[in-house]
Amino acid sequence: MTLHHRLAMGMAAALFCCPAQAQGPAPAPGEVLTTYADIAEAMYGDALTAANTLEGAVTGLLHEPSDDTLKAARDAWVAARVPYQQTEGFRFGNAQVEEWQGRVNRWRMDEGLIDYVDGDKPVTASDNPLGGANVIAAKAVRAGENEIDVSTLSKEVLVRLHGAHGNARNVATGYHAIEFLLWGQDLNGTAPGAGIRPATDFSLDACTGGNCERRRDYLKLATELLTDDLKEMGSAWGEGGAARKALESKSDEEGLAVILAGMAGLSQELAHERMMRGLSEHDPRQEHDRFSDNTHNAYYYNQIGMASIYNGTYKRISGTVMRGPNLADYVRVKAPEEANKLEQSLTATTKALGAIKKRTDDGTEAYDQMLADGNNEGNALMQTAADALMAQARAAEGLADKLGLKLEGKKPGGPGSAVPAP
């Protein structure tokens, strides 16, 4: 077991160390919601800290492109994903987060928008006219009737390109744009290996891939934009911030519903959109962190984030642990049977996603290899995790029903729910 995996398992153990039973009177809902907002502020703050480290590593790469500085930038990107992925439990139910998150974590992308790709397909080769635009090599690109001048790259240009032509696959900013620039395409399919972009793609005197100065500019701008966006969301959860104020304006019942909506919504998205779609098609292009082969960590830390939110306990990247009045203590008093079901589901899902993470961390195979048609063992691990996530979503929705909380009209297996009935 690698050191990274041992640390991750230790994080999980800290979240599930306590028995699922009431330890005293239920905390007041307002106290629970304050802890929830405080953890959001801390998680986004940690994501910003890690992104600042990534920005420093990118600066080092651009100052002296080499195998070592490229590896340092890639390692910093992987580390930056750990705190960010834990924040995704705040998406569903918080309008400010849901509207914002596409700027930093939109992930199913046509990477040919940004840079060269295998075969250098023409711009009109797919249903996305910008899917092969190669902005780094272009002076202008056309989005419908509008032409976008990209002769000089800037943050404003990247923001305008993001989602251009109304196509969500035009991902120009955020973690995955940076990931593609650091790794390049993963052309291995379900065989071993991630992207293999050379450090010389960022070299001014030994340039490979062409347009190295513009590629450097794009990477620098995308990294700066990421830190700008994370700073914005961290502030939104601070005292007087828009996201915290929106939460404080809700009734106790509405606020508690936001927490469970986040857990149910992310569990559903992980199971269906992120896992089962790729598994059913055996398609490595459907994996989340597909250029870097980091998907096993992305999903695992999504789960750790949900457990942290539920338990009101968060281990910061500094090593300090935050604790406060939490939903777990509240529902163990108010709905002990349903709380126990949810906590059993949280434990089972963490174990299932941990098994996928361990399989990659110990060098057996990466997530995209597990997707392969005929890989019965890898497919089974994914199916087990997806099933556990669906059960977790049902448990969160069942707990909400017991408490009389409305999760945007969703019921397990009912209209608007992505969770099949048991």
Image (cartoon, rainbow, N blue to C red):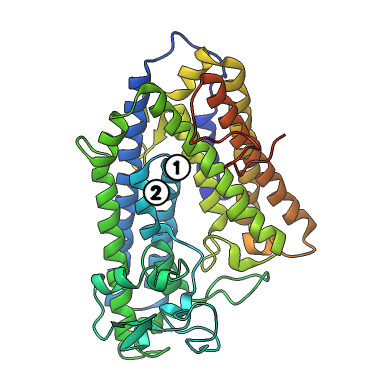
Looking at marks 1 and 2 on the same chain, the residue that comes earlier in the sequence is marked by 1
Quadrant (top left/top right/bottom left/bottom right) for the C terminus: top right
Q: Write the residue at 42% across / 30% down.
A: 313
In-image side of 41 versus 2 (left or right): left
Q: Residues within 10 Å of mark 2 (few under 14, many from 20)?
A: some
Mark 1: amino acid: Phe
Residue 143 pos. (x, y %):
38, 79
**Position above or below: 120 against 398:** below
Mark 2: amino acid: Glu
Per the rendering, the mark at residue 26 is none
Per the rendering, the mark at residue 98 is 2
Towards the viewer: 270 or 147: 147
Q: In which quarter of the image is residue 138?
A: bottom left
Residue 204 in view? yes
- Badge 1 is on which residue? 92
Q: Decide: marks 1, 2 in contact (CB < 8 A)? A: yes
**Position above or below: 298 against 416:** below
Towards the viewer: 176 or 132: 132
